[in-house]
Amino acid sequence: MSLEEKTILVAGAAGFVPSHLSQHYLDLGAKVIGLDNFITGSPQNIEKLSKNSNFKFLECNIYEGLPTLTENIDYVFSLASPASPIDFSEIPLEIMRVNSEGTLNLLNLSKEKGARFLEASTSEVYGDPQEHPQKETYLGHVNPIGPRSCYDESKRFAEALTMSFYRKFNLETRIVRIFNTYGPGMRPNDGRVIPNFINQALKGEDLTVYGDGSQTRSFCFVTDLVEAIHLVMFGDDPTPFNCGNPNEVTILECAEQIIKVLNSSSKISFRELPEDDPKKRKPDLTKLKKMSGYAPKVSFEDGINKTAEFFKKI
Ligand code: UDP
C-alpha cells in the first residue's frame, strides 16, 4: 500500500505506540504531522522520526487548542493519552482533559478537514472484566471512582464522543481498544510490568510481582499492534475493535519467562497488589480476524529479546 499523496496527523507522536505508528506511515510514503506536549512522550522518538523529511512536528497541548494547520489532512489518529498506572496517580487531570477536550479538538479538526478519525481506546474500558475473554460487545465493569477511573472513564467518554460525531455528522470514525502492548521505545521507568521486569532482570535485581501473580494479561508486541490499528483505520467499520495478542499469561509466568529468555540470575519477590488491578485480561479478536484476517506474528520470546536490546542501549 502506498500513501504517498496522503497526510496523516498523529496526536501523541512522541509516545511509544504513536511513534511506531508514525514510522509505519512514513515508511509507506505518507506525510506525517506529529503533535505532543512531552508530558510523557520522549524527545528521542521525535528526533528519530525527524530524520525523515516527510515528518513535521508541532509541540502543543491538544486539550488547550490545536495549532493552525493549513495542510489537507486525510487521517487523524488520537493517541495522545498517557496510559500507565503511575500516570493515573500523577497526572489524572491531564489524562481526563486530553481524552475529553483533546479528543473533541481532534474530532472537530477531522470534521473541518474531511479526514477519517481513529480513537485509540483501551481494554481498560472493560474495567475488571466479568466476561472472559473480552468481546467488543461486553459493556464493562469499571469502578467510576477508583484510582484507574481517570483513564477508564475518560476513554469511555472519548468513545462516546467519537460515536456522537459519527452519528450526528456522519464523520468517518474508527475505534480501537488496545490491550497490553510492549516493545522498544517504551519509557524504562513507565512503571508497567514489562519494562520493570526486563530492567530488573538485566540488572540481576528481584522481579517485583504485585499480589500473588495469578492475575493475567495478554501481551502484544508493538509492530503487531500497529498492524492491527492500521487494518481498523483502513477498514470500513466504525464500531470498536479489540487490538492485541490473545496469548494470555499470569504475571508470575510472565516474570519466570522473562528471567528464562534473558538468562538472568534474578529471583522473584512479591509486593502489594494495587487497588482495582484487573484480575484477568484477554482480547477476543474474532471481530478483527473476520474483517481483516489479522493474526499477531511476534512471539513473546522474540518480543522480549528485542525490547531488552532497546533497554540495554539506553
Ligand atoms: N505488575 C507487577 N509488577 C510490576 C508492575 C506491574 O506485578 O513491577 C502487575 C500489575 O499489578 C498488573 C500487571 O502487572 O497486574 C500489568 O500491569 P501494568 O502496569 O503493566 O498494566 P495494566 O494492565 O495493569 O494497566
Image (tube, grey):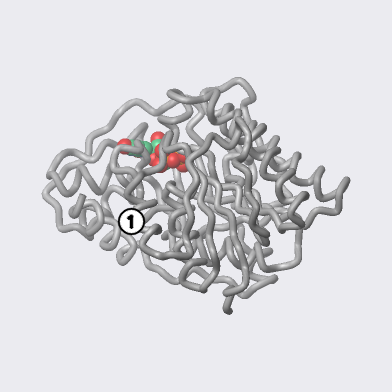
Q: Can residue 214 be seen at all in this image of the molecule?
A: no
Q: Is residue 152 left or right of residue 107?
A: left
Where residue 67 sits, quadrant-wise, is: top right
Please state, as top left, top right, bottom left or bottom right, where the N terminus lies in the image. bottom right
Residue 102 occupies quadrant = top right
> Residue 218's spot in the image, x, y percent?
46, 53
Task: Name the residue located 48 percent from the left edge and 59 percent from the top edge.
Answer: 22
Q: Position of residue 24 (x, y in %)?
A: 48, 66
Q: Residue at x 30, y 64 (%)?
A: 301
Along the line of sight, which residue is nearer the eye, 140 or 220? 220
The answer to whether 255 appears left or right of 99 in the picture is left
Residue furthest to the top in view is 145
Q: Nearer the viewer, residue 196 or 22?
A: 22
Three-letter code, disc 1: Pro
The residue nearer to you, when weighing 308 against 10, is 10
Quadrant of ligand 1 in image: top left
Q: Position of residue 276 (x, y in %)?
A: 51, 28
From what the image shows, is residue 193 above or below residue 100? below
Say which element carries label 1: loop
Q: Residue furthest right?
A: 168
Disc 1: residue Cβ within 8 A of ligand 1's nearest atom: no
Mark 1, other Cα within 10 Å: few <14 / some 14–19 / many ≥20: many
**In the displayed structure, does residue 21 sit left or right of residue 116?**
left
Q: Which residue is mark 1?
A: 184
- What residue appears at the point 67 percent right and 62 percent down from the top-left corner? 74
In depth, the one of 178 and 226 nearer the eye is: 226
Residue 42 in view here: yes
Q: Position of residue 140 (x, y in %)?
A: 67, 39
Residue 3, placed above or below residue 61: below
Q: Residue at x 46, y 71 (%)?
A: 27
